[in-house]
Image: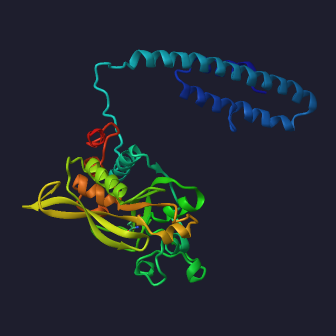
Amino acid sequence: MPDFDALREEFITAVTNAADSRELEFLRIEALGKKGKVTELMKGLGTMDPDERKSVGLSLNSIKSDITTAIEKRKIALAKGELQTRLLEEKVDVTLPIRPEQTGRIHPISQTIDEVVAILGEMGLQVVEGPDIEDDWHNFTALNIPPDHPARQEHDTFYLPGEADSERMVLRTHTSPVQIRTMQHGTPPFRIIAPGRTYRCDYDATHSPMFHQVEGLVIDQGTHMGHLKGCLIEFCRAFFDVDNLPVRFRPSYFPFTEPSAEVDIGCTREGGQFRIGHGEEWLEILGCGMVNPKVLENCGIASSEYQGFAFGMGIERLAMLKYGIPDLRTFYETDLRWLKHYGFSALDVPSLVGGLNR
Ligand code: DAH
């Protein structure tokens, strides 16, 4: 029969003197772990006769409970001591410089969309959105784009699998279907802008399969070409922040507008230097026109009563011109060095305030 008092004494003394929590845990395992001394003795209870089992069992249980209590007590004392030591040892050097803070940058696409929205918003146009996945009717047919139009061809448009030709879904090739959705589901007048992602099968220094456009639509009873010109001239001057920026409307063709125009701004490219607002050359920046009466009728708007204008422009192109970004593909390469260079801090509102206040 082991000496229970000696066993108890041995562990209680060791536990009370344990130097740290590691040693304490070691002692707990030695006494009460799966193969601990007390545990092993308890395993022997099964082979004893009932009287002996009762008395030995009682002693072992009391030893177990005493050791457990001693461990808990020591644990608390050690924790206090360890905290004291840490408080004494660890000092905060308040004279050290703070760690540099990592601040994010606003991507030039977001920045440019914000600028366009701010300028046109100021003129009373409201932002609306439409789906990236469109049906053939909204993306083409309702916009008066005929079935044999080159834009519908497989090599320009991303078609989704399934369904017959006229019911195939597409990744919208422009933001113009948002015009259709707006007119279909609302009642005139309309004054909206629709920024968003657009998709075409194209990839080079000035094209990416996913890019961004902003669409504009203004429909009312007395809206005429003068409003179109005023709105877009003002927009170009505010966006590029150039007073008296030369702006030219060049006749063009889009199935959804009649008449249609492309808008050019004045620039020079002398000695490899590109400057907006000076010189003899012209640079195309957007498409526009008076909404084709057929499009109004397709949306259930009486073209005898309402008319208006629409425009569409590529955000990447605007950003590249304004901020001197040479390759469109770099917008989507997620290179942090690029973003640090071309991105904007949340507090910068470059030139926009000047542009708006004029
Ligand atoms: N949807 C045309 C494109 O993607 C851009 C455009 C031109 C939109 C003229 C318009 C517009 O609303 O009136 O090339």
The quadrant holding residue 65 is top right
Q: Nearer the viewer, residue 74 or 231?
A: 231
Relative to 125, is 68 above or below?
Answer: above
* Viewport quadrant of the C terminus: top left
Q: Is residue 10 above or below residue 162?
A: above
The residue furthest left is 271
Determine which quarter of the picture holds residue 60: top right
Q: Quadrant of residue 150?
A: bottom left
Total label count? 0
The percent coordinates of residue 267 (x first, y second) are: 16, 59
* Residue 318 visible (yes or no): yes
In the image, 262: left or right of 138?
Answer: left
Residue 195 is left or right of residue 26, and the answer is left
Image quarter (top left, top right, bottom left or bottom right) of the N terminus: top right
Up-down relation of residue 223 to residue 162 (above or below): above
Q: Quadrant of ligand 1?
A: bottom left
Is residue 293 positioned above or below 89 on the image?
below
